[in-house]
Image (spheres, grey):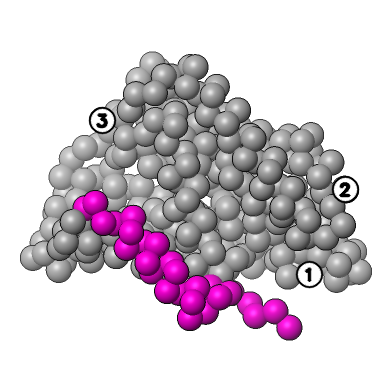
Amino acid sequence: MIVVDIIVSGLILGGLYATVALGLTLQYGVARIMNLAYGEFIVAAAFGAWWLFTANAISPLAGLVVIVPLAFLANWLIYHLLLMPLVRRARSREVLEGDSILFTFGLLFVMQGVMLSLFGGQLYSYSYLLVPIDVIGTTVSANRLIAFAFAIVIGLGLYLVLTRTRAGTAMRAVAVDPRSARLVGIDVPRMSALAFALGGALCAAAGVLISMFLTFSASGGVLFTMKALIVVIMGGVGSLLGTLVAGLLLGLAEVATARLIDPGLTLAVNFAIFLTVLLVRPTGLFGRRSS
């Protein structure tokens, strides 16, 4: 039945979209870094998973154990070595946001150029658990289901970290009001760096999971950045629930459009939904209204 197929496929795709956007939710919502190179980090992780699988016969799921900590460390160093000067000189979060856009726009081309020199411009993919599984009357490949299951675990784990740990509570306080957070003894630069690094780790995890069933290329990061930005802004900056709802909504809309109308219109439909939500609610579905 086509309705069941659309719902199942849309929820799986939407859940993965939400996972892709979780890292940017932390980086922008807490550290206030608008990372335009976000998609390049996703593609870099995908290439890492591809290399581990094709050259060393290491499954991408096992590759998470290697790639995610490396991504955390890399983003921690990027924040401290490259972004910290911007943080120190910024007079406000709005100024920092603008400076970070310019910096990460340049970083985007640096990373893209390095990956193009290493891997060329062709599309890459690999076959991993490409086994059809019946799910309530519709067929879904095993790699998509496993990626979706890992996405649920990652999302739940992030929710528990942010709501059940002192560091998570501190990060949420910084996201709401960094000045007030300082008054209660929270080390705002340290929490911002932690949020940026954790966001980079989540970004890498999403890249590994996506590489299991999607083709990717060295110049394809812009599309991932755009999708992540749509989900984050549409859901409400800094809102995990908003990220989840927005991701699921876009996934369902994209699959329904591809199956019922024309696959070429999926991007247009995504932007139409995005603009409609912002016209009705400028702060996003679950965004806070400024006082």
Q: Which sits earlier in the primary sequence, circle 1 or circle 2?
A: 2
Across and down, in percent, residue 80 comes to: 79, 39
Residue 199 is labelled as: none
Dot 1 corresponds to which residue?
177
In the image, residue 9 sits, relative to residue 120, either above or below, namely: below
Residue range in magenta is 263-291
Q: Do the residues labelled 1 and 2 touch (CB within 8 Å)?
A: no
99 or 148: nearer the eye?
Answer: 99
Number of other residues with Cα within 10 Å of mark 3, as a class: few under 14, some 14 to 19, many 20 or more? some
Across and down, in percent, residue 240 comes to: 54, 66
Q: What quarter of the picture does the C terminus occupy?
A: bottom right
Most common SS among magenta residues? helix
Does dot 2 land on a helix, a strand or a loop?
Answer: helix
Q: Is residue 276 magenta-colored?
A: yes
Q: Which sits earlier in the primary sequence, circle 2 or circle 3?
A: 2
| Residue type indicated by callout 1 | Asp
Q: Which of marks 1 and 3 is in front?
A: 1
Instruction: Please tell me in which quadrant of the rendered image residue 10 appears.
Output: bottom left
Q: How many labels does the image show?
A: 3
Dot 2 corresponds to which residue?
88
Does dot 1 land on a helix, a strand or a loop?
Answer: loop
229 or 212: nearer the eye?
Answer: 229
Residue 76 in sight = no
| Residue type indicated by callout 3 | Ser
| Residue type indicated by callout 2 | Arg
Dot 3 corresponds to which residue?
127
Q: What quarter of the picture does the N terminus occupy?
A: bottom left
Across and down, in percent, residue 82 comes to: 76, 36
Q: Nearer the viewer, mark 2 or mark 3?
A: 2
Residue 229 in sight = yes
Q: Is residue 164 magenta-colored?
A: no
Estimate the spatial distance between the alpha carbons at disc 1 and disc 3, rounded to whole Å. Answer: 46 Å
